[in-house]
Image: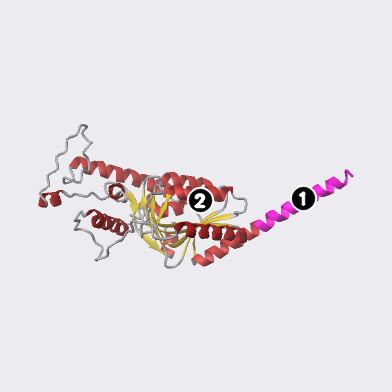
Amino acid sequence: MKNRFRIAGMIFNQPLMVTESMLDQAAAWANQQMSLNIVNLSLNGAQPQMMDDDNGPYETAAMRAESSRRQMIADTGVAIIPVHGVLVSRSMQMNPCETMTSYEQLRGQVSAALADPAVEQIAFDIDSPGGSTVGAFELADFLFEARGVKPMSAITHYSAYSAGYLIASAIGNVSMSRTSGVGSVGVIAKHMDVSARNEQMGVKVTTVYAGAHKNDLSPHEPLTDQSLKFLNDMVQGYYGQFVESVARYRGIGADAVRSTEAGVFMGQQGIDVGFADRIETPQAAIDRIAAQAREARVTRNSKQSIGARAKAMALQTQI
């Protein structure tokens, strides 16, 4: 049985860099799984699902995916790293229908690609509504430094929102199609108040605590002014980091980033606000990157061949 309370703790009372619609879906899932009776969710009747058990041969699928990835690198010199679905700080033993990608997983994949001599370029296939703030800025700074080691590109296929866009901006060289979207540079948090449900069920929760902030954000009572200030301070703090990071990664002013007011920008709009670099289809982006990688590989091999011939000639003079 999955630890539902741990997952709920990732959804509520936490500043998140995610689109509001995705957060509402996550809250609806928690509502369904934990019988929270949350009523103010704007999902238009949609109910997210989660599988509790492993129902597929994931090891076999993973092995096939790894074999395909290695063949792609051998053929093209390009390592394609997927950044799909909700972004979380660490891999957890969950099997949600909603795709998830962890920051630690991405760091490992990028480190492997940087160390692999067969990889000429790294392309990130991004389709994400965002996710957790925890670990996001650390990964983004790592990617920003890594793009100086090997050429890297972010392909918006077809959404790079919030934390997903933070990653894209850190990677640099952002491409998007006419119908792709970037942006949502903002932070959001929700508080869950189940006190009315408890009262209806005849449940009274009494909390004994020491330390003025120990009971902040309790779900068993309405949000206090102190708790609201605490949560708002966290949101504003992360928002400031988000704005400054995107401004630094993209080389644009922080005021310009802040003025977007967490808006999302489609196609040419993303270019106009400085959030992307070119309009092209995802396939065209891959073709372009692969061509650049092939050219780099040919150039390197040619230099190595010239070097080998020079060494051979030097040896002949000693015979």
Residue 35 visible in rendering: yes
What kind of residue is marked 1?
Ala
Q: Is residue 299 magenta?
A: yes
What kind of residue is marked 2?
Gln
Estimate the x, y position of residue 224 in percent, counting from the top left. 17, 43
Location of the C terminus (image quadrant) = top right
For the stretch drawn in magenta, what is the main secondary structure?
helix
Please give the residue where the numbered disc 1 appears in the rendered image.
308
Give the side of residue 307 with respect to residue 109, left or right. right
**On the image, which quarter does residue 237 sit in?**
top left
Q: Earlier in the sequence, mark 2 or mark 1?
A: 2
Please give the residue where the numbered disc 2 appears in the rendered image.
109
Estimate the x, y position of residue 11 in percent, counting from the top left. 29, 50
Measure the alpha-carbon separation of dots 2 and 1. 32 Å
Residue in view at x 56 percent, y 49 percent: 114
Residue 143 visible in rendering: no
Residue in view at x 21 percent, y 55 percent: 35
Give whichever of 37, 95 is nearer the camera: 95
Q: Is residue 295 magenta?
A: no
Span highlighted in magenta in the image:
297-319
Element type at mark 1: helix
Label annotation for residue 268: none
Give the side of residue 306 with respect to residue 102, left or right. right
Mark 1 surroundings: few (<14), some (14-19) or many (≥20) residues within 10 A: few
